[in-house]
Every structure is written in C-alpha cells, then in structure tokens.
Amino acid sequence: MSGDGGREIWVTGAGGYLGHEFVKTCAREGVSSRLLGRDQGIDLSRPFDLDERFEGLFSSPAEDRIVFHLAAMSRWEDCEREPDTAARVNAEATGALAAAIRRFGGRLVYVSTDLVFDGEHAPYDEESDPRPASIYGRTKRLGEVSVLAEPRNLVIRLPLLFGPSFDGKRGAGDSILARIRNGEPVVLFRDEWRTPLHVARAAEMVLAEGLDPGTKGIRHLPGPERLSRLELGLRLIREAGLDDSLVEEGSRLDMPGVPRPRDCSLSTLYPPPGS
Ligand SMILES: NC(=O)c1ccc[n+]([C@@H]2O[C@H](COP(=O)([O-])OP(=O)(O)OC[C@H]3O[C@@H](n4cnc5c(N)ncnc54)[C@H](OP(=O)(O)O)[C@@H]3O)[C@@H](O)[C@H]2O)c1
C-alpha cells in the first residue's frame, strides 16, 4: 500500500487485534496506509535501533504524515512478567517514534488504554489524573507523556475491546467463547468494571479522530455502557447462542499478583466522532 497525494499514513501494530480491524477500515474508507512493523525492520523492543530506521522511512517530505501507533506489549500478564521489555516497547520506543516525527514532520496518533487509571475514581474523563496500577498501565502512560509533548499529536484512550479476532484468541470475548465451546468452565469477575467497545467500532473511531487535525491532546472513546466482566461475558456467550451454565462468578481479588483495577470506566468531554 502507498501514500496518496501529499498524505502519508503509517500504521504500527497492523498485525494485532485492533490493527487488523484498523487496516480493514482504512481500505474500506479508501485511505492508503503503509505498515510499520517487524517485516519493515521495526522491533520496538530495541528502541535504540529505531532512530536510523525511522530516518530512512520518514526523511522524505510529506505534506501530511500521520503515524497511527497501535503496536504495544498489550497483555497485562506479559508486562508484569517482563517489565524491562514492556518499558522498552511501550514507553521508550514510543518516545523514539515521537522524536522521529518531531524531527521529520507529521502527527503521531497513539492508542492508549483505560488502564492508565487506578480504578478507584471512575468514570474517568480526559481531565482525570492517570495513576496506573500495573506495569502495563505505567509503561503506556510513559508513552502518552512522550506523545503529548508535541501539541499536534493525539492520544486516544480505548476501553476493553471485544468482538471476533483474526486468530480467535484476542479481545475480551474470544477466549471465553472458545472455552465454552470446548465444554470448559470460565471464571468471570463480578467486580471489574469497564466501558467495553466493539473492536470494529474502535478502529473506525481511531481512524476518524486521527485523520482530523483539529483533534489533539487526549480523547477517550468509551463504549456505550459500563459493564462488569461477568455481565459482558454472559452477554457475549448468550449472543453466540451458547450455554452459560459453565460460567462461574469470581473476584479479581482472587487472582495472584497485582490486583486488576476495580472500575476503569471511561467517559468523555467531547461528542463522538462523526456526530
Ligand atoms: N485489546 C484491548 O482490549 C485494548 C484496550 C485498550 C487499549 N488497547 C491498546 O490498543 C493497541 C492494540 O492492542 P491489541 O489488542 O491489538 O494488541 P495485540 O493484538 O497484542 O497486537 C499488538 C501489536 O503490537 C505489535 N508488537 C508487539 N511487540 C512488538 C515489537 N517488539 N516490535 C514491533 N511490533 C510489536 C504486534 O506485532 P506482531 O503481530 O508482529 O507480534 C502486534 O501487531 C495497543 O496499544 C493497546 O495498548 C487495547
């Protein structure tokens, strides 16, 4: 895929859950995008190598360069287990990308998370103070800070995403549905609340917000309602026509390690894109 006119759109994390939907959305909307991933020699766990790579990719002038930065070490447990890698991928590499765009021109659109909040003061709007409780949240917040140093950049905080994934293993629903289909029990937390959003809708809104140069700073894209993990899981199981008798209610406090935040529900001070 190539840029169109003076516009040059780049995407990191195109091979991920959201990235797959994002690239499909771009194609549907007639937006040409270029991939910025491992196949292009971009390994975010080696941020010290990135300057040279970005220089090679971004040094040609583009009237309107927008980089959608979706790539991340995105799993809570992976980040807790490998905090140094999480810091390199989520924080340092984002800083290197922000610096390259500052140097060569363009705007960075960074996809972040509701988990930059502590879960004790929901709902959180764009002016709420981030206070991350996990390595994942802390490293994503550090990425945000690098991005926000440039006023034209945009940080989009997404809630928990659900909806089918390309490999059947990602998002809030796929692994639950797979276990139920296999006749295995599923424990769902009654005491973890989020404002979940369908991944396809998230991709559409990230593209719309990112392409609008007037949208800067921080934007939240909450889903339509606040749901517990239990409520969301039961809804997805029933919508799939599956039997919910294998669902067991649980508590996030029963999990080993850092407790997941209680309620990271997002709200927004702005109208939804396209309204
Ligand atoms: N899923 C959610 O519920 C959710 C909620 C809120 C915010 N977010 C945010 O949304 C974004 C996308 O999340 P996702 O769920 O789509 O994650 P995902 O499925 O885990 O995809 C992550 C992407 O990042 C890339 N990546 C990871 N480490 C990399 C590295 N060292 N070098 C280069 N690329 C690397 C992966 O590339 P490979 O495919 O090559 O491994 C993959 O394309 C993330 O920024 C995440 O923080 C997600």
Image (tube, rainbow, N blue to C red):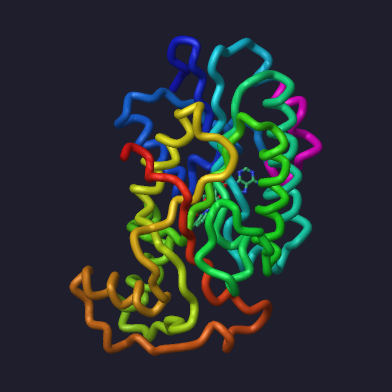
Residue 241: where, in percent of width, then height? 18, 73
Residue 107 included in the magenta stretch of the image: no
Q: Which residue is more in the foreground, 25 or 36?
A: 25
Report how many numbered discs are placed on residues in the image: 0
Is residue 131 at all visible to an observer of this figure?
yes
> In the image, is 100 to the left or to the right of 75?
right
Helix, strand or loop: magenta stretch: helix
Depicted 35 relative to depicted 1: above or below: below
Which residue, as the protein is rendered here, is positioned at the far left? 241
Quadrant location of the N terminus?
A: top left
Q: Nearer the viewer, residue 103 or 88?
A: 103
- Residue depicted at x 54% and y 61%: 124
Q: Is residue 164 above or below residue 183?
A: above
Query: Which x, y percent locates residue 233?
Result: 35, 74
- Visible residue check, residue 21: no
**Foreground residue, 258 or 45?**
258
Camera-side residue of 192 and 183: 192
Residue 46 located within the stretch drawn in magenta: yes
Q: Which residues are magenta?
A: 44-55
Identify which residue is drawn at 22% across, 76% down.
242
Q: Is residue 112 left or right of residue 206?
A: right
The residue shown at (64%, 84%) is: 256
Q: Where is residue 109 drawn, in percent x and y?
A: 56, 36
| Residue 244 drawn at (x, y percent) | 27, 83
- Above or below residue 198? Residue 155 is above
Q: Quadrant of residue 275?
A: top left
> What residue is drawn where x is 70% and y is 64%?
135
